[in-house]
Image (spheres, rainbow, N blue to C red):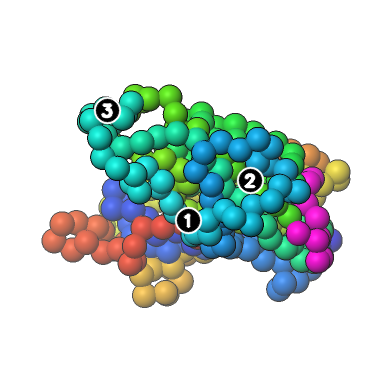
Amino acid sequence: MTKLIHQIKTHFCCFISTSTLIVLFLGSCTSSPSKIRQIEDFGKNWKFHLGDVANGQEPGLDDSQWRGLGLPHDWSIEGEFSKDHPATPAGGALPGGVAWYRKTFIVPESHQEKLVFIEFDGVYRNSEVWINGNSLGQRPYGYSSFRYELTPFLKYRDEKNLLAVRVDNSQQPNSRWYSGSGIYRNVWLVTTEKIFVDHWGTFITTPEVSQEYAKVSVQTQVRNTTPEDQPVMLKTIIYDAAGKKVSAVAVDRVIAKNSVAQIDQHIVVRNPTLWSLEDPYLPEGCLLYVSE
């Protein structure tokens, strides 16, 4: 068996009474330390063109005269204010329109046995994404995050890959406030093993909390993309804000081939430090970090 380690670190947000650090390990008995989920900030070295372009998704298109920039980016705020813009003053009185973004990148040969995803935290709006000329999908709504899998269309080693995004914010007015235009939030390149915790696959609650103990419920969606059933072990460790281990639980499960399974775990934390306005006990920030 190939050991896969999955680790999730999450700080309970302020609406949860017990403030702890949770770490989950997903694996079997022969892990390699090199098998890690990688999350790469994909905001650097993009090229941008304001206006529509025929076949802007094609790798052979000459974009040498396009503007270089980093993401996040909003092209509307770079325009001139005018009450005559279709957005109207209620929508910010700035121009919308259509624009393209392109980025070339290299994927190492070592990633050929992994899965690679592109994640967009927000694109306003009517976006379509291509990899190496292949359409990955369209997203009309501008306020939700989304992701696509790149794996089937990638090139490896020294061959360049082209990611292209067309954004159409020309249908105005479409908002009751200023929305901006473009890839206005972060973009991430995520690489995982073929058995991994699914996208947004962890749900944590504290159904019972008192001075004496807190019950922590963790629901984890584990995806097996291989053609065989796979035994996994999911281990969850809870740490306090000082990094001290306070509780742990492990579950063994066989995940069927090409499927997603939910693993439920229940952990008891003795004598938890309770959050309050007078004592807002929290690890710094309120975030989700994933590595495998």
- The span from disc 3 to disc 2 (Cα, nearest Å) is 31 Å
Tag in front: 1 or 3: 3
Give the residue at the far front of this rendering.
65
> Residue, x 40% and y 47% (percent of image)?
74
Instruction: Count residues near mark 1 (Cα–Cα under 10 Å), then give few for <14, some for 14-19, many for 20+.
Output: some
Q: Which residue is mark 2?
A: 164
Stretch in magenta = 151-160
Q: CA distance from mark 2 to mark 1?
A: 14 Å
Amino acid type shown at disc 3: Asp
Q: Say what amino acid the circle numbered 2 marks.
A: Ala
| Above or below, 37 relative to 231 | below
Q: Quadrant of the N terminus?
A: bottom right
Mark nearer the viewer, 3 or 2? 3
Label 3 sits on a secondary structure element that is loop
Q: Residues within 10 Å of mark 3 (few under 14, many from 20)?
A: few
Q: Is residue 10 left or right of residue 152?
A: left
Please give left or right for residue 138 compared with residue 273 in the image: right
Which secondary structure, mark 1?
loop
Q: Nearer the viewer, residue 39 or 256?
A: 39
Residue 153 is inside the magenta segment:
yes
Q: Secondary structure at mark 2?
A: strand
Task: Please report whichever mark, 3 or 2, sits nearer to the chain's N-terminal start.
Answer: 3
Residue 43 versus residue 94: which sits nearer the camera? 94
What secondary structure do most residues of the magenta stretch adopt?
loop
- The residue under the point 72% across, 43% down is 58
First reached walking from the N terminus: tag 2 or tag 1: 1
Question: In this rendering, would 263 be left or right of 248?
Answer: right
Instruction: List the residue tagged with mark 1.
Output: 71
